[in-house]
Amino acid sequence: MKAKKLVFAMMALATAASVVAGCGGSDKKAGDGAKSDGGGKKFINIATGGTAGVYYPLGGALADILNKNVKGANATAQSTGASVANVNMLKDGQVDVAFIQNDIAYYAVKGVEMFKGKEVKNLKGLATLYPETVQIVTVKSTGIKTVADLKGKRVAVGAAGSGAEANARQILEMAGITYNDIKPQYLSYAEASSALKDGNVDAAFLTSGFPTAAVQDLATQHDIALVAIDNDLAEKLIKKYPYYTKTTIPAKTYNKVDADVPSISVKCMLAVTDKMSDDLGYEIVKALYSNLDRMKTAHNIAKMITKETALEGMSIPMNGGADKFFKEK
């Protein structure tokens, strides 16, 4: 009897081992750079941003598009710390596609700014999508009207080491302001919105497609103001940091903001690494640009995503398949 039990136990262990081995196959990289289960499924992990931003809903829509239009795709979008975190997740192989700012992609490939000494040379671009506009938000009761007015104030400059934080620092620099002149608070968009509501900060920098959920939420409870980046400041910024472009935030974008507000933008882009095959890169961009209506259902900013502008502001080398797609007539 004991011998039979021993045989059954050994058989069970062998079965368990084979199951574990089978599961382990899902972590192996397929030839196209997406994880595969060995049965033709391509697991495509998409890094987005915080749930109060724009990357998150667009990432969900992109996953839906890929699942319906790329053979074998099993795509999922996940909330992350956005651009800088996404580059590191790409580098570490935790994700396959990421939404990032074009300036952050440039820093990563060149090994400058927050990537000094930590360059990520194998980043590749799929497409640039839409302008990500720097929005300097305050409530009217603070009396802040210009960038110069931020001196001595409590300012949310974005999460530490984030793309928004780099933008804030560069804009302040061009206005002759350093972090020694303000009281910097390193907050996410949702945290900055809450802090503005509670009166714990005076202004916040956000870099995002507009309208941004965190700002919309704030504007339902308080009279807000957007601080302009005037033409002279924008020109100085662009001269030193050429990945910026001038942008106007239209009147009525947010509740009771009744006039156009000049600002500057970087570009949101989709990035991968050189581990992604040209074939899969081609399939992804073809699926995306053939189904832009689905992206528009996720966020209004998607109306600015077009094939004609998909290479504007591309700051890193392209995936070969994506490059081929955009060169086709």
Image: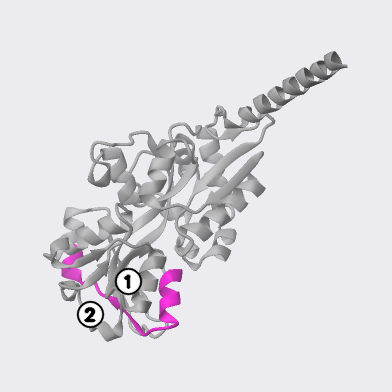
The Cα–Cα distance between marks 1 and 2, rounded to whole angstroms, is: 19 Å
The span picked out in magenta is: 211-235
Q: Residue at x 65, y 24 (%)?
A: 21
Crowdedness of circle 2 by 10 Å Cα count: few (<14), some, many (20+)?
A: many
Looking at this view, name the residue that lies furthest to the right.
Answer: 1
The spot of residue 261 in percent (x, y) is 30, 76
Mark 1 highlights which residue? 248
Crowdedness of circle 1 by 10 Å Cα count: few (<14), some, many (20+)?
A: some
Q: Quadrant of residue 260?
A: bottom left
Q: Residue at x 65, y 30 (%)?
A: 23
- Residue 94 versus residue 33: which sits nearer the camera? 94
Q: Secondary structure at mark 2?
A: loop
Disc 1 residue type (three-letter)? Thr
Is residue 7 highlighted in magenta? no
Residue 264 versus residue 311 in the image, above or below:
below
The spot of residue 232 in percent (x, y) is 16, 68
Is residue 231 highlighted in magenta? yes
Q: Residue at x 23, y 46 (%)?
A: 113
Disc 2 residue type (three-letter)? Ile
Looking at this view, name the residue that lies furthest to the front.
Answer: 2
- Residue 198 versus residue 158: which sits nearer the camera? 198
Q: Quadrant of residue 111?
A: top left
Colour pattern of the rendering: one colour
Looking at this view, name the residue that lies furthest to the left.
Answer: 176
Q: Nearer the viewer, mark 1 or mark 2?
A: 2
Residue 105 versus residue 239 in the image, above or below:
above
The spot of residue 132 in percent (x, y) is 37, 61
Mark 2 highlights which residue? 144
**Count of numbered labels shown in the rendering:** 2
Q: Secondary structure at mark 1?
A: strand
The N terminus: image quadrant = top right
